[in-house]
Image: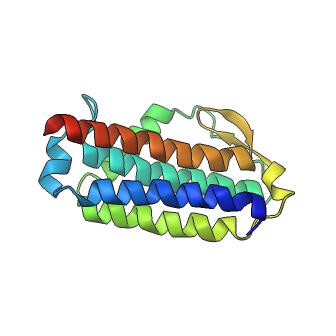
Amino acid sequence: MLQELSPMANKINEAHAILKKTLGALSDDQSIVTKVNPDWSVKDEAAHLAAANRGMLGIAQRMAQGLDPKLPEGYDNDVFNARQVAKRKEQTLAQISAEIDVTHSELLAFLGTLTPEQLLLMGEHPLYGQVVLRDLLVIIYTHQIMHCKEISAKIRESK
């Protein structure tokens, strides 16, 4: 792994460990009853993370191949998020957490393959527009940390 990516890998691991600890402390019932916002439960937000992590990793992989990925015409991030959460509605929290684990492992393996030149390749992120791969990697872990903090705060409030 590139030396400059080592601190990023540490942050990605730290964010993942916090998320796993937070989700692991909940039963399925708690994850459904505890609301993070009016529309999403903790389980829904975990489902969103599973989908977002998978999607952003896919963008990152295509960027590393030099494909400069673009969003499809008419793409709506809210529609995508709602569809992905609905797709995981019947899964248990453990199943969603396992999906997050798989993507986490794939992301770490991907980091180990990158060259300095690839970190400067471009692609389109749904919210941030055109970004370089290095910045997308930061977006991935900060997105996870943000949602983990929201989940943790709502769990504390519900007690």
Q: Position of residue 120 (x, y in %)?
A: 83, 49
The residue under the point 51% across, 32% down is: 76
Asked if 21 appears above or below 81 in the picture, the reply is below
> Residue at 59% of width from left, 63% of height from top?
107
The image quadrant of residue 82 is top left
- Could you say which is closer to the camera, residue 104 or residue 96? 104
Which residue corresponds to the image point at 18% horizontal and 46% vertical from the top-left?
32
Q: Residue 62, percent across and down?
A: 71, 57
Image label count? 0
Relative vertical location of residue 73 with respect to residue 5 in this rendering, above or below: above
| Residue under the image location 84 percent in, 59 percent down | 116
Q: How is the image coloured?
A: rainbow
**Is residue 90 at least partly visible in the picture?**
yes
Q: In this view, does 112 lie above or below 30?
A: below
Give percent across and percent down for residue 123. Answer: 73, 44
Q: Which of 143 and 58 is in front in this view?
A: 143
User: Which of the image's four quarters has the C terminus?
Assistant: top left
11 or 90, nearer to the observer: 11
Viewer-proximal residue among 25 and 125: 25
> In the rendered image, which quarter contains the N terminus?
bottom right
In the displayed structure, does residue 142 sit left or right of residue 40?
right
Residue at the extreme top? 38
Where residue 125 appears, as percent x and y from the top left, is 64, 40
Q: Can residue 69 be seen in this view?
A: no
